[in-house]
Image (spheres, coloured by chain):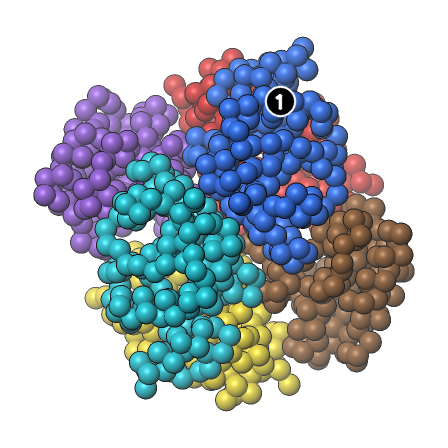
Chain colours: A brown, B yellow, C cyan, D blue, E red, F purple
Amino acid sequence: MTVAVVPGSFDPPTLGHVDVISRAVEVFDRVLIAVVANPSKTPLFSSAERIEMLTDICADWPNAEVDAFDGLLVEFARDRGAVVIVKGLRAVADFEYELQMAQMNQHLSGVQTVFLPTSPEHAYLSSSLVKEVARFGSSLEGLVPPVVATALKERFQ
Amino acid sequence: MTVAVVPGSFDPPTLGHVDVISRAVEVFDRVLIAVVANPSKTPLFSSAERIEMLTDICADWPNAEVDAFDGLLVEFARDRGAVVIVKGLRAVADFEYELQMAQMNQHLSGVQTVFLPTSPEHAYLSSSLVKEVARFGSSLEGLVPPVVATALKERFQ
Amino acid sequence: MTVAVVPGSFDPPTLGHVDVISRAVEVFDRVLIAVVANPSKTPLFSSAERIEMLTDICADWPNAEVDAFDGLLVEFARDRGAVVIVKGLRAVADFEYELQMAQMNQHLSGVQTVFLPTSPEHAYLSSSLVKEVARFGSSLEGLVPPVVATALKERFQ
Amino acid sequence: MTVAVVPGSFDPPTLGHVDVISRAVEVFDRVLIAVVANPSKTPLFSSAERIEMLTDICADWPNAEVDAFDGLLVEFARDRGAVVIVKGLRAVADFEYELQMAQMNQHLSGVQTVFLPTSPEHAYLSSSLVKEVARFGSSLEGLVPPVVATALKERFQ
Amino acid sequence: MTVAVVPGSFDPPTLGHVDVISRAVEVFDRVLIAVVANPSKTPLFSSAERIEMLTDICADWPNAEVDAFDGLLVEFARDRGAVVIVKGLRAVADFEYELQMAQMNQHLSGVQTVFLPTSPEHAYLSSSLVKEVARFGSSLEGLVPPVVATALKERFQ
Amino acid sequence: MTVAVVPGSFDPPTLGHVDVISRAVEVFDRVLIAVVANPSKTPLFSSAERIEMLTDICADWPNAEVDAFDGLLVEFARDRGAVVIVKGLRAVADFEYELQMAQMNQHLSGVQTVFLPTSPEHAYLSSSLVKEVARFGSSLEGLVPPVVATALKERFQ
C-alpha cells in the first residue's frame, strides 16, 4: 500500500489545492494532507481552522486524511509510513524551488517527491492572491471551495 | 492496483532513464515501460534492440514490464489499464514541454501525468549527448548501464 | 488609428490563435492577420487554404483582415501602416524566443511588439500537437474551430 | 478610443518605466499611469512625490495622465473606462508572475493585460537596485530621469 | 595577474560555496572571498565568525584570501584591483537575478562577472535550507564542511 | 598561465560573439577561439572562411588565436593545455543547455566551463537571425562586424 503526503500551508486551501488532492487520491492508496502548523509568515487561519476546512473538503474521499505537523516534513512522512511526497506544480518558478526541496528531502531521508501538474484553469491561483481578492471584497467564485469562501468573508468583514 | 506507464524513445536508455524507472517501481504497483516504436528521428537502435536492452535493465524489478507502442500514448495507456503516465524531469525546459503534453493528454483521455525529478547527478544525461560521446570513442562510464555501453561500442566500431 | 499585425504560420489555426485574435480585435482599431506564406517546414495546408480558414474564423470581426506575406515581417508591417506586432504568449519558452524577435524587429524598423497572454485553458495548444492528434484520429473537440476540424479530418482520411 | 492603464509602485520611476510608458503612449489612445498608493513595503517616496515625478516625466505626452489608486487594480481600471492593463516585461521571472496576475485580473473583471518588452539596455533596471546605488552615493547616470536623480540625491544626503 | 572576487553572505558556507571557490582558485591567479558584512536579513553568524569559518575552509589554497565588505561590491572590487566578480550558478532563477546584477555592476564600474556552474550534486544546497536542517537536528553530512557542521550544532543546541 | 577556449560555430560571427571574446581576452592569459569545423547543420561559410573572419576580428588582441576542431571539444581543450571553456550567455534557454554541456564536459575530462553574460544590447543577436536579415537584404548595421557584413552581402547577392 502506497502512502503519499500532500504538504502545504493551505492558508486557505484554494481550488488549485483541491485539484491536486483530487488527483493524488486517484493515484495513491492513502493520501495524508499535511498542514504546516506554524508557517514562516503568520497565517490568516489557525492550524485548527485550516484542518477543519480541509477535512470538510476531503469528506468524500475515503482514502484522504488531514493532519498538522511541525519540524521537518521528511520526519513526519517517515513516522507515518509514507514513501512519497506529492507537490502540485503550476509554473516554472514553482518547479525550480520544488526540485531543490525534493533533492534535499531525498538526500535527508530517501523519501521521494512526485509532482502533479495543476489543471490549466487553476494555474493562476495562490493562497496569497485569493486573500487579497477577499480583502477587497471581490467575488471568490471559481477561486476557492464554498466552505473557504464563507470563512474568508467572515474574516474580512 | 495502480498501473503506471513510463514512455520514451530510449535510444539508448541512459542511467537517467534507469533512475526514473527505479523510482517508479517503488511508488507504483505495476510499471509498464513503453518504447516509442517509430520516433520522429530515425533511431540508432531498432525497437527490438531497445526493448531487449530495457528488459535486461529491468530484470530485477518483478513489477516492471517492457513493451513498444505506435500511435497516441494515451490510447496505449487506456488499452493497458494504466491511470498514470510517469515522466522524469531534469530541467526547466523539460518541464514546460512536458506540462503542455500532460495537459493535452489529460484533455484527450483523462489519464494523468506525474513527474519524477531525476537525481542531480543524472541531470545532464540525454540519449543524444551519450550517442555523441560514444561516436567519438570517449568513456561511457557513469553515463549508461553496461549492456548499453557494449551495444554503443559495437555500433560505433 | 492603431493598426496591429498578428503574424503566424497558422498551420492550422487553433483555438489558441482564435483566442489571441479575439483579444487583439478588442484592443486595436484594425487587426491584420499575417500568414507566413512559406514557413521553414513544409506546411500541411497551402497558404490559400490557411487564409480561407482564417477568413471564415474572423467573419464576425469587422476590424480583422487576413493576408499572406513573404520576407521580413517588419517590412510587411511598415508597408501596411502597422505600428505594432501582436504575439500570443503561452509559456516561458515562448517568451524568450519572442523577446529576442521583438528586440530584433525593433532594431530593424522601430515597429513595436506587444504580447497577449493566452487563456489558461488554451496554454497547451499548438498547431503541431493538433496535427498529431488528428493524424491518429482522436477527437479535435476543444482544440480547433469547426472549420479547421473538418479540414483536418479530410486531410488525414 | 482605447484607454490603457500602466500600474506600478514607481518608487522611484526608472528609465525602464519611462521606456514602457513611451511605448504605451504610441500604441494606445489614452494612457493612465496608476501609482499604487500604499505598496506592501513602505515606499521611499510618498504617493504625492511619486505622482509629481511621473507628471514631470510625462509632461510632453498629451495622452498620458498620472493618478494614484488603492484596492484592486481591475476596479480602478473599470472605473476609468480602461479596457487594457499594460505591463513591462524584462525577464522570464517577471513573465511568470505577471502572467498569473493577468489571468487573475481577466477572471475577476474581463480586463485584458498586454505586455510590452523593455529595451534590452534597460533590462537590468529596477527601483530597488536604483535605490541601493543611490544609497551608496554612486552615479545615477543612465538609470533614472534627471528629476528622479535629484530627488534620490536629496533623500540620501 | 587576474584578481577575482567571490562575494556572498556565507551564512554559513555550504559545500556548494566550497565547490565554487575550489573552481575559482584553479582558474584565477588570486581569489578574494568577500563576505557581505551586514546582509539585509540578520545573519545567524557574525561577520567575524563567517570569516573565520571561510579562512579555515580555504587554508589549503594559497591564492585564496578572505575579507568582509560593506557598501557596493564594485567599489570593493576596484579598491582591491579585481577585474572580475565570480558567482556560482545553481538554477535558472539564480541566473536571471545574477544576470541583472552583472549588467548593473558592469554599467556602474566596468567590472565583469563570470558565472561558474556548481556541481550537480550541490545544486540543491543553500545556506537557508542548511540552517533549517540544523535547526531540526537532522544530519548535516554532505551539506557543509566539518567546521560549519560543528558551529551549526553549537548554535542550535 | 590560464588558457581558455571559446568554442562556437561562428556561422557567421556576430557582435555578440565579439563581445564575449573581448571579455575573455581581458580575463584570461591566452584565449583560443575554437571553430566547430563541421557543425550539424551545413554552414553558410566554410571553416576556412569563418577562421579568416575571426582572425580579422581578433587582429588587435595579441592573446587571442583562432583554430578549427573536429570531435569532442574537451579533447581539443586538453590537447591545447586549456583548463577552462568560455561560453557566452544571452538568455535562460541558453543557460539550461549550456549547464548540461558544462556538467557533461566536466564529467568527461575535468575541464571547467565559465559563463560570460553578453551585454544587454547584444542579447537578441544570433547567427541564424543575422543570416535571415541578410537574406532579405536588410541593414546589418549594429549586428555584425564590417568584415562579416561584407561577406554576407556577397553571399546573398
Image height check: is E102 above or below A29? above
Residue A22 drawn at (x, y percent): 70, 73
Residue at x 42% of width, y 65% of height: C58
Image height check: is F89 above or below B34? above
Q: Quadrant of residue D93?
A: top right
B61 relative to F72 in the view: left or right: right
D102 relative to C154 in the view: left or right: right
Residue C23: tell me if it is visible: yes
How many numbered marks appear? 1
Residue at x 36% of width, y 64% of height: C10
Q: Secondary structure at mark 1?
A: helix
In this orientation, which residue lies closer to the viewer: D98 or F123?
A: D98
Residue F57 drawn at (x, y percent): 20, 28
In this orientation, which residue lies closer to the viewer: B151 or F99?
A: F99
Q: Which residue is mark 1?
A: D53
Residue at x 44% of width, y 77% of height: C146
Image height check: is E81 above or below F42? above
> What chain does badge 1 belong to?
D
Residue C77 drawn at (x, y percent): 32, 47
In this orientation, which residue lies closer to the viewer: A61 or F88?
A: A61
Q: Quadrant of residue E14?
A: top right
Residue E8: tell me if it is visible: no
Image height check: is F21 above or below B31? above
Residue E101 drawn at (x, y percent): 52, 31
Task: Look at the image and tell me in which quarter the N terminus of chain C lies.
Answer: top left
In this orientation, which residue lies closer to the viewer: B94 or D60?
A: D60
Residue at x 81% of width, y 62% of height: A149
Task: Look at the image and tell me in which quarter the C terminus of chain C lies.
Answer: bottom left
For the residue marked with disc 1, what is the amino acid?
Met
